[in-house]
Image (tube, rainbow, N blue to C red):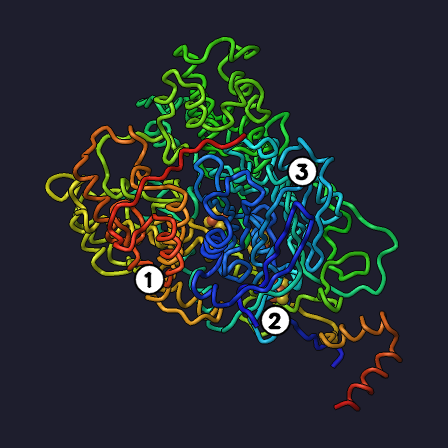
Amino acid sequence: MRYAETGFNLEIDLTRGNIERVATDPRDTELYLGGLGTNAKILWDRVPPEIESFSPDNLLIFAAGLLCGTPATGCNRTIVSTISPQTLLMVYSMMGGFWAPELKYAGYDTVIFRGKSPTLVYLWINNDKVEIRDAAHLQGKGAIETAELIKEELKEPKAQVAAIGLAGENRVYYASIEQGRSSASRGGIGAVMGDKGLKAIVVRGTKDVNIARPAEYLELCNEVLEHIKARDGNPIPGVMPILAGLGSPQEMAVHDEKWHTENFMWGNSRTRIRDFWTEEIAKAWMETLESARTRLISCYNCPMKCGATLSLPGLPTYMMKCFSKLTYTLAAYSDLDFGLKIAQRATEYGVDGYSAPQVMAFALELYENGILTDKDFEGMPSDNEGRFYWLLDRIVRREGIGDVLANGTYWAAQEIGNGAESYAHNNIKKHEQLPLKLSMLNPMYFLMYATGEKINITQIEGNFPQAPFPTREEREEFVKDWIQVPDEKFKQYFLDWELRGENSIPYYPTVEMCCEIVDWQEMMHYIDDALGMCAGLSSFPLKPPYHIHNYPKFISSGAGIDMDEAKLTQAAKRYRTLVRAINIRRGMRRKDDKPPEDHWKKRFPELEAELLDKYYKFKGWNNQGIPTRESLHDLGLDYVSKDFIQRGILTDGEDTPSKETSAEKKNEV
Amino acid sequence: MKDEKKTKIIKTIKIDVDKCNGCRACEVICSAFHAAPKYSSNNPARSRIRVIHDPLKDVYVPIYAGEYAVAECAGRDKYTIDGKEYDECAFCRASCPSRDLFKEPDSDLPLKCDMCEDEEEPLCVKWCITDALTYEEREEEVEEEEEEQEEMEIGLEALADKYGLDKIMDTVARMSMKG
Ligand code: SF4
Ligand code: SF4
Ligand code: SF4
């Protein structure tokens, strides 16, 4: 018997309309765990670098993490992986909600799509019965609307639906996949789904998920619940409220937006408004949120209620979580009421809440600066907010200038030319980022931004505090119950970290310490993404209930895989390296490992070079960021080095820099 | 003897639907607890509490599995509360032929909440840390002690309804002969 996982994948060939249920190899679970790990293995094996994002041979993979569907609190992530049309690299985006556990209960760990359906279809997974169904009548429908219509036509109110909206159908490079209160939205995975002619995946399951050593597992789950309860009454002192508790940032619950509105950038990530947060605004925004919000809601098996149901006058109800609360508001220099209203339309269209507002603000900046002209904006209303609605409508329909903007700021700037490139200034690896511009380089964040292949800071940072605490006493207090550290030395790093003087940013934490801290934080995210755990209870907040010391026990007692800290660390490193290998094979090199150019005002080129050099070495990569033969061998990834050597990416003397290939090739649209 | 009143413990689970966030942790733990061996699997379809929820309509109703009903009611009820329309039979606890709620997914045998028998506190309550579910016990005087129906008896009754008592007896006899 298989535990925690079901041991079966679904292989769906959309070109031929073929459906297969395939048993998986338990040895792969041991090596790659599941979720992101096994997705990476499948992509490495089956999608060579010649395959472009919109090729029928590209795969779109939906995986339920290894522990999804077990009683482990907050373990509900679906990990969607494919090749991104925007970054041209492997992309993986996660969604919470209810879909992944349901897939497990239906008897599958992963659904793998290949090919393209000639007409728009949806997949209906009902335990053993799996069918491809016509979706012609759903064409152009909103993502949430689609979910409701499908549940109605199947008479299955308990089914879980992941669907795309118009943006996905029209292959907008930042189209999302929406699933009720959650979405997988980064990197354009919705565009790949649309390209495959797949409108939705609907799942209903009523089977058991098994646990290898039940009593032990339940004990661990109960400890997690106790930890969550204890943390609930004891926010961490000395950090801002959204970092003090557990869960995803509690954007739907908090009213005080002073920090975001005064520290994040407005417009096309341009302007900081220092004294924005007045009493008057605070009152108005509170009223907006209070009257729109019907309820705070959770994902499957989690008490944290990070999301909310929102009903605005005259608009259909929708659900929201996290920071999309403010991204439209900031991009348009507007207010919360506008932000929540346009987000409703954006959610139905299915676009990423980071990229979409930024692209629109970028377009208007180009217009103001004469790079785009009246001709491009014919018919656009003159009021600020109306312009955003107008742009959003054009983008998701790929009409006029919208067709160019639908490819994101990087590709749009390439196409527009005439100096537009410098306006696409807030990207990493061609992908739009949170509107954050700071003064002094932070060496840890430099490494995370530059090398994190999730290309999204909130999904890379986490367990180590973002800033030093002012006094030694506060720091000593903090480390007292800091059980999550993989090694005691991290406590010392933190204790010695000062706001000013010798032991301060950017030269402290030292380069060596930065490597270790970043590696730890990244490892936790990679483990979460394989197990299906919400980062909000593990890798993202300070002092979370899940950590490197209890995870091995969860895996051994839950999945029945013999696991300890060393083995888990090694497994995470293995598939992390595999993700890099996939991207290296697609042309990614050191030149791509960099933060948005203007992210910090004060830069330190020598220090940054040293950080990269040492971090690469620490990770077992050569100075181009390519995993070395030796490190690949240690991870049992000889098949990767063999491929690298065949392709001339590594030579037999592995430290020779390889010839430059490039991820610059333009997509066919 | 006649006037001597007996007392019994009344166990009440209080449900505050305003606090429910739709997480279904209650379903997870109930189904895990009732797995054999305990916690060896879980499957919300086997849970004895189900959260009927429709987030877009803001409908959140945790419902406990009650008695097994041989036949459905003569008519159905449909509530609207505070402008929210609830599904037909939404508040009914019965394991009833008219719906798939509170039945074992494979055998269709009815499920009934047993208040987690020997546990200190019902587990759904314990796992609902947002306090949508809370637990209360009080003593009350009763006229006569009621016979509690055993779980197996309920199951058998349901089978009898489905196949007829004779057929069940035959089958049991056959099975015991096979040894
Ligand atoms: S912490 Fe929040 S986002 Fe994470 S699983 Fe729980 S409710 Fe969902
Ligand atoms: S555990 Fe509590 S909050 Fe969660 S669904 Fe059940 S009753 Fe609602
Ligand atoms: S009290 Fe126990 S048996 Fe009844 S629904 Fe709750 S967990 Fe299930």
Q: Position of residue A455 (x, y in %)?
A: 39, 40
Chain letter of disc 1 in the image? A
Q: Nearer the viewer, mark 3 or mark 2?
A: 3
Residue A450 seen from this side: yes
Mark 1 element type: helix
Q: Position of residue A181 (x, y in %)?
A: 56, 42
Label 2: few (<14), some (14–19) or many (≥20) C-alpha neighbours in 10 Å: some
- Looking at numbered disc 1 in the image, what kind of residue is underneath it? His
Residue farthest to the top, as pictured: A374
Residue plotted at (86% across, 73% down): B163
Image vertical order of residue B24 relative to residue B165, above or below: above
Q: Are marks 2 and 1 in contact (CB under 8 Å)?
A: no
Question: Which label's residue is closer to the chain start, 1 or 3?
Answer: 3
Per the model, the C-alpha gap separating discs 3 and 2 is 36 Å
- Looking at numbered disc 3 in the image, what kind of residue is underneath it? Thr
Residue plotted at (76% across, 73% down): B155
Q: What residue would you read off at disc 3?
A: A146
Q: Identify the disc placed on residue A633.
A: 1
Residue B145 seen from this side: no
In the image shown, does A531 or A17 lie closer to the viewer?
A17
Q: Nearer the viewer, mark 2 or mark 1?
A: 1
Q: Identify the disc placed on residue A410.
A: none
Mark 3 within 8 Å of ligand 1, using the beta carbon: no
Q: Is residue A320 left or right of residue A600?
A: right
Q: What residue would you read off at disc 2?
A: B35
**Quadrant hosting residue A171:** top right
